[in-house]
Image: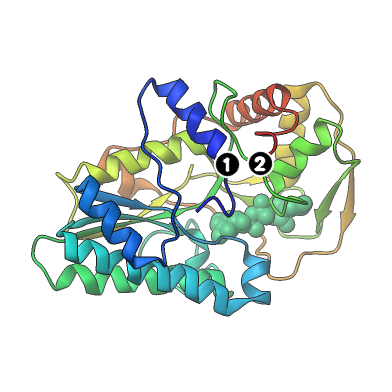
Amino acid sequence: NLCNGHEAALERVQGITNCELQFMNADILDSNTLDKVFNNFKPEAVIHFAGLKAVSESVADPLKYYEVNVGGSISLLKTMSKAKCNNIVFSSSATVYGDPQYLPYDEEHSTNPVNPYGRTKLMIENIINDWITTDSKRRGTILRYFNPVGAHESGQIGEEPIGTPNNLMPYIAQVADGRREYLNIFGNDYDTADGTGARDYIHVVDLALAHIGALNQNKLNKFEILNVGAGKSTTVLELLKKFEETSGVTINFKYLPRRDGDLAAFWADSSKAFEKIDWQPERNIKKICEDTWCWHKLNPTGYGPK
Ligand code: UFG
């Protein structure tokens, strides 16, 4: 419904792919419109990305998150049932694991999300699991994303957060392009190589390719959960240094206390995705920084006005 997106991005996708896209501006909670869309398009499968994704907002307004994420998923599955569309690939998150009992996280790791956003993701995973068991033809594939970053290498499509970025990579890029003076680094006393938080950054194009793999069902069970991460962690300072090398710009920073709710470090064991969908990430941190910087340089004001 474009609440956090730009129609211009879809126009650019058509330019990159030379394919025509049909776009319907509708809300996932609007069942009547969903039914009409499914009657018109008769999709074989759904890749379900429609959700809200800001952790702090989910703490401030949990009901909105349960309504849109959980309610929206129920609305979608009801429409899929009516249309006999039996295959769903769902965007979940590594945040469902919670405090690491061991690392890297594999898909068997216990789940204990610590904020409403994470709890909506886990609920939806369970709802999909219940939904697929009621019909032998139904299938559900859950992709647990780690930290998606980067942009398409054409520099045509990328991330444009509304307001102050919450996430590290867009913040670093906005310091590099002069929109912000310095980066706040939340904590330098973690038990990591340099004391700053460490995450598993995955190039958004590698992540996109995992969805294509998930639609190719041959080795997948009826219900499958797959981690989608690079399998290694990078600290805040390491990412910042790599971005400086790529852009040639010095990125000033200040240390602040730890951010509430942040974990020290986590990363993925993504070997199951390799085994089941022949997927592995091919774009490293250098490529992530190059593509992010290219997007920023070519689009200093993002997609422009809506
Ligand atoms: N950080 C800073 N300064 C900033 C922003 C972030 O130092 O301005 C640090 C954080 O403290 C953390 C690291 O950079 O150590 C990454 O933080 P992000 O906000 O970029 O990402 P998170 O790991 O906190 O969360 C992201 C998504 C979640 C998702 C999670 C799953 O925002 O929605 O990844 O891995 F659930």
Q: Is residue 85 visible?
A: yes
The residue tagged 1 is 6
Mark 1, ligand 1, within 8 Å: the answer is no
Dot 2 amino acid type: Glu
Which residue is located at x 79 percent, y 64 percent?
A: 258
Residue 89 x, y percent position in the rendering = 31, 53
First of labels 2, 1 by sequence position: 1
Which residue is located at x 56 percent, y 74 percent?
A: 64
Residue 215 x, y percent position in the rendering = 25, 44
54 relative to 280, above or below: below
Q: Nearer the viewer, residue 262 or 153?
A: 153
| Quadrant of the snapshot with the C terminus | top right
Secondary structure under badge 1?
loop
Q: Nearer the viewer, residue 134 or 253?
A: 134
79 relative to 196, above or below: below
Q: Quadrant of ligand 1?
A: bottom right
Q: Residues within 10 Å of mark 1 (few under 14, many from 20)?
A: some
Q: Is residue 192 visible?
A: no
Picture quarter containing residue 86?
bottom left
Label 2 with label 1: CB-CB less than 8 Å: yes
Q: Nearer the viewer, residue 73 or 134?
A: 73
Residue 128 x, y percent position in the rendering = 29, 68
- In the displayed structure image, the side of residue 298 where residue 105 appears, left or right: left
The residue tagged 2 is 160
Q: Residues within 10 Å of mark 2 (few under 14, many from 20)?
A: some
Secondary structure under badge 2?
loop
Mark 2, ligand 1, within 8 Å: the answer is no
Residue 156 x, y percent position in the rendering = 57, 25
What distance separates the C-alpha of mark 2 from that of mark 1? 9 Å
